[in-house]
Amino acid sequence: MNATIVGGGLVGSLWSIFLARRGFSVTMHERRPDMRRADIPAGRSINLAVSTRGLHALERVGLREKVLEHGVAMRGRMIHAPDGSQSLLRYGKDDSECIFSISRGTLNKVLLSEAEETGRVRVHFDRLVRDVRFSESAVHFADEAGEHSAELLFATDGSASAVRAALMKLPGHRETSEELSYGYKELTIAPAHSAGLDRHALHIWPRGTFMLIALPNEDDSYTCTLFLPQRNEHRKGTRSVSAEKGPGSEAAGGRKCLSFEELGDDAAVRAFFGEHFADAVPRLPDLTEQFFTNPVGQMWTVKCAPWNYQGRALLLGDAAHAIVPFFGQGMNCGFEDCALLDDLFAKGTHDLVTLFSAFSTMRKPNADAIADMAVENFIEMRDKVADPKFVFEKEVEKILQKEFPGDYVPRYGLVTFSRVPYRIAFEAGVRQQAILTELCATIQKPQDVDLKRAKQLIVEKLTPLLRG
Ligand SMILES: Cc1cc2nc3c(=O)[nH]c(=O)nc-3n(C[C@H](O)[C@H](O)[C@H](O)COP(=O)(O)OP(=O)(O)OC[C@H]3O[C@@H](n4cnc5c(N)ncnc54)[C@H](O)[C@@H]3O)c2cc1C
């Protein structure tokens, strides 16, 4: 059977391997040149965190170890306080629960090469797909090489998907897309300036309404990402947490730079970094050059349904569910799409109308849940990790996790280190917050937590959800 894929990014390349292993002959149309031959940027974000869901999908096609050869394990968040002190908030119960930083370009190249090596995947590069039309018998589209018809088409053309745009014009389809008022800018700490940074951590400089993060790369460099409101207007409608926290606030006096719009010249950028990320500044000797060379990226949440056109076309990955990057799950979720869809294919592909509808219906609530959790996690990363109440609750949570292994698994762990459906992880998080709020209300020290009451609450609220 023949299949067409639009978009040879991370999810498209992986899905082509799954299809090839099921005996499909695959043609993939990718708008960019072949990144293995041309020196081109790999697109959004230089590196990504891959975790259990993504690793499981890679394992299914025998690529987990090959990919991990290029990954750097990160065991927690290293919080950089304004005074330069650092503290580690572990992600999991111990070092066995890590996420892995990997270069997007390297990962995409590995997947493209593996796809071609199956002998069943043909990739056409420099082919921008447009003018997509759907009919009973086929999906019609045009690209640089002319007009094409596909009996079976998978759209993995990312958050600005051309296939989704056409599909959502059909009756019965709906889409919402929401742009985050924040932008992001990437900056690189060169290996020569990275000594002393803990290589096995995701570094965060949380500053209330904005933050800087840094992920390690294979070559000892770090990719920093500054997340900051795009425009000044954001401040009018948003309570500025840093404004309540002393230095750096408007209350402390003077005009402060708190949006990309305000960082218009070298002096403003230097002042901003010097004030908020002082310990990062010596690591970025070419800060202003990088700052004004690299673009400001935008972030979107896209929700749509249904993801399929009969049994002819199906959206996967960001094309179906673009999310903001703060849970490190966009790619992991797209990879999980591939593994779950392959499970359905394993049962037979004779009725793709039913199969695609079932997949879309089953997966959509989970995609919506991770989209919402990703937005929540932004607030956690940029603000709450520096909040003593949050840190206190996290300490209590660690105790619960240790005392009730398997029965109390924090939401972060359910999302990152398990394959529990995202919607269950979402609900578990709501219930866990209620448990923590009650347990922390009357204690001064985390060790004083009432374990008997904790057990009751866990059995009452969490066990039925996770074991039900
Ligand atoms: C700053 C940032 C950090 C992130 N960090 C993480 C992280 O740590 N962990 C994680 O899991 N996720 C992360 N993500 C999300 C992750 O990047 C995406 O979820 C993932 O790339 C989705 O893969 P995809 O293949 O669906 O789409 P994409 O990677 O966008 O690939 C789409 C492909 O389709 C091609 N294409 C687009 N339009 C057309 C067309 N019309 N015709 C032909 N080809 C086309 C593109 O060139 C591209 O190759 C991050 C995202 C951002 C922005």
Image (cartoon, rainbow, N blue to C red):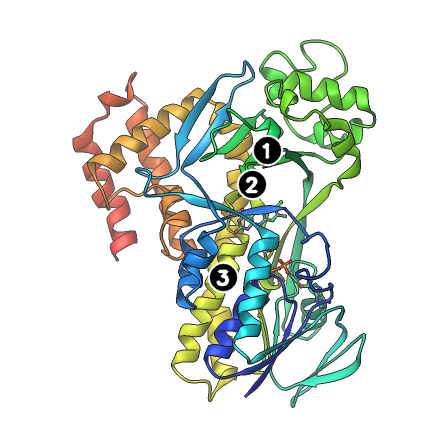
Amino acid type for the residue under numbered disc 2? Asp
Q: Is residue 273 above or below residue 38?
A: above
Mark 1 packing: few (<14 Cα in 10 Å), some, or many (20+)?
A: some
Residue to which mark 1 is pinned: 191
Residue found 73% across the figure and 66% down from its top: 31
Q: Residue 117 falls in which quadrant of the image?
A: bottom right
Helix, strand or loop for disc 2: loop
Mark 3 packing: few (<14 Cα in 10 Å), some, or many (20+)?
A: many
Q: Quadrant of ligand 1?
A: bottom right
Q: Percent x, y for residue 443? A: 28, 19
Task: Tell whether 449 sits left or right of 109.
Answer: left
Task: Tell whether 73 sits left or right of 46.
Answer: left
Q: Residue furthest right?
A: 265
Residue to which mark 3 is pinned: 335
Helix, strand or loop for disc 1: helix
Alpha carbon separation for disc pair 2 and 1: 7 Å
Q: Percent x, y for residue 101? A: 50, 45
The answer to whether one can see residue 296 in this image is: yes
The answer to whether one can see residue 211 in this image is: no
Q: Earlier along the polypeptide chain: callout 1 or callout 3? A: 1
Instruction: For marks 1 and 3, give the one nearer the viewer.
Output: 1
Alpha carbon separation for disc pair 2 and 3: 26 Å
Amino acid type for the residue under numbered disc 3? Phe
Q: Residue 399 falls in which quadrant of the image?
A: top left
Q: Percent x, y for residue 102? A: 53, 48
Q: Residue furthest left?
A: 452
Are discs 2 and 1 less than 8 Å apart at CB?
Answer: yes
**Label at residue 219:** 2
